Image (tube, helix red, strand yellow):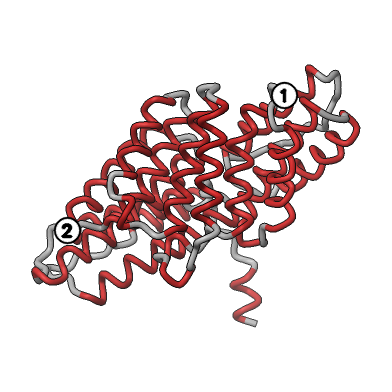
Amino acid sequence: MAAATAATVIVSPDRLTQMLSEARTTVNPTRVGTVEIKQIHEAAQLFARWDATYGGGLVRDVVVAQLRVAVAYLKANCSARDRAALQMAVGSLAHTAAFMAFDACAHDDANSMFALALDCAEESGAVNLRAKILSSMARHAIWNGRNHDGLGYVRRAFTEADKLTATERAMLHTTEARVHAKLGDIPATLTSVANADRDFSRCAPGNDPAWMRYYDSAQHAGDTGHALFDIAVHGSFVGEARDRLTAAVDGHADTAARSRTMSTIKLASLVMATGDPDEATTIANQALGRARDLKSQRANEDIAELRRYAHRAKVRIPTLATTT
């Protein structure tokens, strides 16, 4: 009876906010060791998995709060042996938080967090993490139309290419291909895609760091398909772009729901621009259905692009009440 009575009690949102504000914050430790470093790494991986599945909109504030705690750890006492590992862990979490901000199109937040992540990676000598961060920074720059900045980030990552795994080099080549496609350089785009395919064929997943586990054949197909999209909508290599985007849509698991959705949206836009509008509408409806389950402003902006292609094709697609 007590449980039933408690279940009927309604706490107002204002009261809940007050209760949370009265909660005590975690006291930062005066000394940090391997246990705390492991916890930061696990938090980064947990939030990255959530981000890939649902988009970062719902938990972004939680990640930011966790990042503040992790940054405070940098001020604590730490053995010389563990200091680099701590910086690397904080850099990994900062990268996760930065990409969530990017996905939410909170671009100023993304810039500052990417800068923090890169500082931590470079100070700790974490070459592999540095490459991942620079690749994400390049993608962020490209998204915002800063294509030459994006190319600069990629080239900076390639300065230590001999220390990277084949998977990481493939990832960087796909990012490089995106830049060249945005700049309209078709030969350079094709060269970068070919280089990405070559390195991906040499992948040995067991050699890759934890944050590269997402980069499987579906991700590679999607990333190269996205790169080719910008030349395909103008009539070049349409079939190749379509095949790769289709492979990504078919190959992504539920744990990569955002990537699957965004590849579906791109595929719909490509078919709308270059193929059969009826087929494009079918793909678009599939994309919209998947987008309803995401908290991703990037996906919303890709849907807005899809609507522009549909308008040019004189096709009407359903309205989607998207959330960020």
Question: Could you say whether the residue bearing mark 1 is in a helix, strand or loop?
Answer: loop
**Neighbours of disc 1 within 10 Å: few (<14), some (14-19), many (20+):** few
Q: Residue at x 67, y 27 (%)?
A: 305
Compared across the picture, whether 36 is left or right of 224 comes to left
Q: Which quadrant is the N terminus positioned in?
A: bottom right
| Residue 74 image label | 2
Measuring from the top left, give residue 205's x and y in whole percent.
48, 68
Disc 1 target residue:
235
Gap in angstroms between the C-alphas marked 1 and 2:
51 Å
Q: Nearer the viewer, residue 34 or 143?
A: 143
Front position among marks 1 and 2: 1
Q: Dot 2: what SS?
A: loop
Task: Write down the quadrant of residue 138 in the picture.
Answer: top left
Identified at 57% across, 37% down, the residue is 298
Give the residue at the far right of this rendering: 278
> Looking at the figure, which quarter contains the C terminus?
top right
Q: Is residue 236 left or right of residue 112?
A: right
- Amino acid under disc 2: Leu
